[in-house]
Image: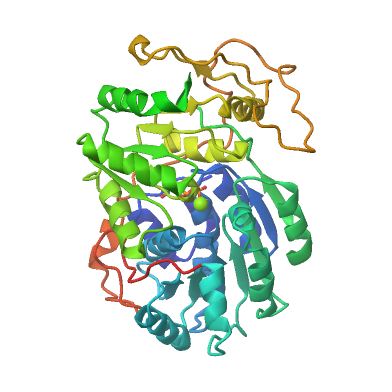
């Protein structure tokens, strides 16, 4: 299948062409026809498979056909970064089309709120918003959703994890009952199915997620004590110093901050990204990381989903993610779309049990790599033993279905990541003839736009 088979309007086809998109990815091939038929859809595919374009392209196409000035589609996303990223993608695809779009993602100063308010009062065909901020505006009464025909929830699993369930219900109460609802998610836990039951009508379902890292990722793990982690990390960073982009994930932001300090002291080109930073700082870090002036980013899980940065050669999990699915997401930051990458996890004694669960999920045993001798004795590895039992939880049963052997591949990835040769970052729209958009525009060719530090 090619994009021609999808029979998009010429303005959109031109935008696609300019973005270098030639062939739809599997999720796009399956989802776009369903969306074009106005059916509700629940779509599950792992990160990097092209979900954004799967919902953005048919939406733009419909707006071109409808020739409307009204707010026609609402896209709800969990994080500001994702809102910006989708906004940029839409601007790229709709470069030649009369489609307007704004991103509403918060900030705690009155100026950005006023800017958003103005933009919302003027209206835009597509609104991309984080839940909390959108509700703040909805409560003020000037947002008109009477004409919204399409509601899209992106990273729905993440939104529920972040506790946005009530917010979503509230937002939905402002929308017309007659509408198309699309739910995109990287994973399909039961709570997503429950949500779908509540807000979708006779949805089609597409599921090409297999909860496995893309085939191009080489995975490995080090069994260590916490005290050995800093030295081991520095060893690895030195070993991989030729790589343009490296992400180190920590579960907690305090750990992120400490590690940033420690690495800076040792002279590494490093910056951290976590929820305590002002939005502008987060944008700048992300921008520098995208344009490769920043080599090492230390981040919490806020960065592990949805954010698309080209060619990250190495992902280090400084600790074992709490949620096995988060492992797949973190590791999914490397080897995007058919490239190669390495993902290394530090397993401390408390993390061993969790890592066992991850291996269950990905149905592979990750190679345990030798720790350099000068770092001293390492812990024994026994993932069946739970350190710090959670009361009332049944111990997890391991080992039965393990394949054994040290495979790192984790099997084929049918969905497949995808990456075209589309122009990188925001450079493409740097010379957008449409000029600045209502909220101040972001024609500066980067991830940036936001005069907006975090809200809730
Ligand atoms: P997901 O939301 O599934 O994690 P994204 O929508 O962020 O994935 O897409 C991942 C990357 O693949 C992006 O850089 C995007 O531009 C690129 N991409 C998506 N679809 C195509 C396509 N059909 N052709 C070329 N590149 C694509
Ligand atoms: Mg996505």
Q: Tell me residue 447's x, y (percent).
A: 32, 59
**Residue drawn where x is 64% and y is 41% of the image:** 208
Q: Is residue 133 above or below residue 265?
A: below
Whether residue 309 is visible, yes or no, is no
Please identify the quarter of the rendering in which residue 390 is found: top right
The image quadrant where one finds the N terminus is top right
How many numbered circles are shown? Answer: 0
Q: Is residue 225 above or below residue 29?
A: above
Q: Tell me residue 375's x, y (percent).
A: 36, 16
Please identify the quarter of the rendering in which residue 238 is found: top left
Please identify the quarter of the rendering in which residue 420 is found: top left
Q: Tell me residue 127's x, y (percent).
A: 50, 73
238 left or right of 366 in image: left
**Residue drawn where x is 49% and y is 67% of the image:** 60
Which of the colour schemes (rainbow, by chain, secondary structure, one colour) is used?
A: rainbow
Q: Tell me residue 179's x, y (percent).
A: 68, 73
Whether residue 182 is visible, yes or no, is yes
State the residue in front, 256 or 195. Answer: 256
**Residue drawn where x is 54% and y is 85% of the image:** 143
299 left or right of 389 in image: left
State the residue in front, 129 or 20. Answer: 129
């Amino acid at each position: 299948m090619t994009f021609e088979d999808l029979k998009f309007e010429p303005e959109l086809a031109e935008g696609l062409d300019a973005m270098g998109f030639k062939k739809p990815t599997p999720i796009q091939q399956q989802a776009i026809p369903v969306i074009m038929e106005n059916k509700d859809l629940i779509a599950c595919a792992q990160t990097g498979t092209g979900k954004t374009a799967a919902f953005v392209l048919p939406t733009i196409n419909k707006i071109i056909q409808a020739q409307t000035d009204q707010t026609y589609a609402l896209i709800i996303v969990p994080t500001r970064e994702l809102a910006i990223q989708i906004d940029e993608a839409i601007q790229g695809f709709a470069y030649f089309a009369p489609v307007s779009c704004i991103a509403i993602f918060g900030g705690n100063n009155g100026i950005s709120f006023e800017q958003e308010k103005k933009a919302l009062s003027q209206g835009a065909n597509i609104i991309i918003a984080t839940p909390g901020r959108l509700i703040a505006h909805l409560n003020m009464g000037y947002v008109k959703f009477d004409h919204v025909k399409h509601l899209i929830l992106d990273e729905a699993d993440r939104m529920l994890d972040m506790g946005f369930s009530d917010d979503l219900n509230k937002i939905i109460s402002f929308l017309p009952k007659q509408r198309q609802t699309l739910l995109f998610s990287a994973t399909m836990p039961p709570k997503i199915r429950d949500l779908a039951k509540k807000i979708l009508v006779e949805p089609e379902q597409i599921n090409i997620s297999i909860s496995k890292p893309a085939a191009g990722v080489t995975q490995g793990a080090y069994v260590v004590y916490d005290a050995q982690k800093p030295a081991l990390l520095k060893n690895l960073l030195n070993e991989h110093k030729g790589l343009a982009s490296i992400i180190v994930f920590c579960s907690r932001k305090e750990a992120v901050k400490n590690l940033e300090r420690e690495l800076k002291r040792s002279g590494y080109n490093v910056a951290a990204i976590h929820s305590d930073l002002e939005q502008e700082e987060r944008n700048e870090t992300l921008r520098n990381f995208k344009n490769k002036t920043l080599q090492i980013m230390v981040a919490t899980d806020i960065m592990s989903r949805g954010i698309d940065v080209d060619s990250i050669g190495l992902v280090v999990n400084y600790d074992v993610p709490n949620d096995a699915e988060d492992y797949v997401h973190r590791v999914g930051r490397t080897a995007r779309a058919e490239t190669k990458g390495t993902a290394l996890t530090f397993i401390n004694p408390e993390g061993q049990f969790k890592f066992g669960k991850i291996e269950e999920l990905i149905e592979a045993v990750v190679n345990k790599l030798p720790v350099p001798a000068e770092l001293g004795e390492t812990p024994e590895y026994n993932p069946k033993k739970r350190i710090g039992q959670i009361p009332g939880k049944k111990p997890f049963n391991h080992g039965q279905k393990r394949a054994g052997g040290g495979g790192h591949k984790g099997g084929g990835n049918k969905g497949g990541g995808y990456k075209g040769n589309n122009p990188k970052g925001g450079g493409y729209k740097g010379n957008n003839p449409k000029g600045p958009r209502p909220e101040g525009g972001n024609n500066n060719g980067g991830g940036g736009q936001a005069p907006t530090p975090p809200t809730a």
